[in-house]
Image: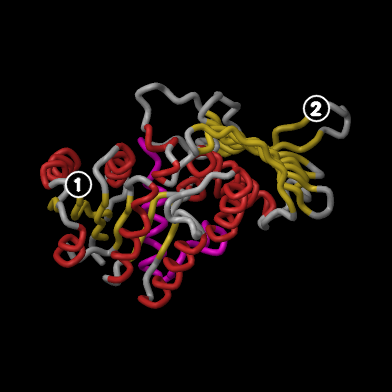
Amino acid sequence: MKGFRWGIVGTGYIAGNFACSMRQVADAACTAVTGTSLEKANRFVEEHGFEQGFANFEEMLAQAKLDAVYIAVPNHLHYDFVMQALDAGVNVLCEKPMADNMPQLQRMMNKAREKNAFLMEGMWTRCFPAVRKAAGWIEDGRIGKVRSVRADFGLRSAPDWQNWKTSAQASAGALRDVGVYSVAMAFLGFGEAPESIASSCVIKNGADTHQEMMFRYAQDRAAYLTGSFEMITDHHAYFYGDEGMIVLGDRFWCPTYAELYAYDGGDIFEKRLLERFEEKYEPFGFQYEIAHVQDCIRSEKKESGFYSLAESAAIMEITDTLRREWGVRYPSDPA
């Protein structure tokens, strides 16, 4: 492939950020976009330098000869667009959360296998260089055995914010919008699902707006996690091990740096900075995910090695279980 031909589904805020980030990837070709109207699609084409706009997704799939589509629409619309793209044999990167629930996700994964297509949930965090560095330190045992992970993603939503994100009808809520980033940090640290979960949750208008979670693991390990639309939290992630700790920041879901510390044997309260990795980036950071997806597809991989479909499924099992406990139901949930 000389240029990797991308199509985008959606013309909103995230789609625009993704399109801006494409400029940082030399061979990412701005090929096509589909919106809720041809007018919106053509406005996006003009603003971001795409070749063609469509108001009909099926027409875009049939005419644009795409290498992959990026789906960036509200949560409850993901399933239909993912399945249409896979049915057409087109590779898919879908903004998280990719599916509403496990039955939807299982059908997506089955369809991707049937069509021999690449499929990835857009956990862009896993592609940032600082996260890759932290993952390497953990894998190499630089902090010993990981004993505790702490990650809080909390924001205070404004009155004019995207209201669909607090709507159960749109398959939304704080857990799957921001809390899932905290959950993914637990998976990064421990590499496995927890044995049990304790949680508290605030529900408003049928959707969760704040949760506190403690994941328990074997061998006395735990993760302490927050997702919130109601309060602003510390936006670093912390990985504590037997021999040291790692800090990801300053917004751990799109960090610019990772720090590796060792405990100072001479002082019971102090730690020593061993290594600091920093890579600042141009807005908005999607370029790392874009380049990763292109590399995977060109290498004929059918899923990401940074964020596998198995991990998507494991996290979906957790979010489904928590929603059932909290009484948060989506229109697409099984009866």
- The residue located at (55%, 61%) in the rendering is 313
Q: Does label 1 or label 2 sit earlier along the sequence?
A: 1
Q: Which residue position is annotated with label 2?
A: 270
Tell me what residue is drawn at x 18 percent, y 42 percent: 44
- As helix, strand or loop, the secondary structure at mark 1 comes to loop
Q: Which is more toward the observer, 18 or 291?
A: 18
Label 1 and label 2: CA atoms lie apart by 56 Å
The magenta segment is: 283-311
- Seen from the viewer's position, the closer of residues 207 and 19 is 207
Q: Going by the image, does 162 lie left or right of 217?
A: left
Using the rendered image of the protein, determine whether residue 236 is visible from the camera's viewpoint. yes
Q: Amino acid at mark 2?
A: Glu
Q: Would you name the residue on which mark 1 appears?
A: 36
Which residue does the image show at 44% across and 68% down from the upper left? Answer: 107
Between 234 and 29, the one lying in front of the other is 234
Left or right of 126 on screen, residue 236: right
Q: Position of residue 75 (x, y in %)?
A: 39, 48
Q: Which quadrant, please, contains the N terminus?
A: bottom left
Horizontal relation, residue 142 to residue 304: left or right: right
Q: Residue at x 51, y 32 (%)?
A: 204
Q: Position of residue 247 (x, y in %)?
A: 64, 36
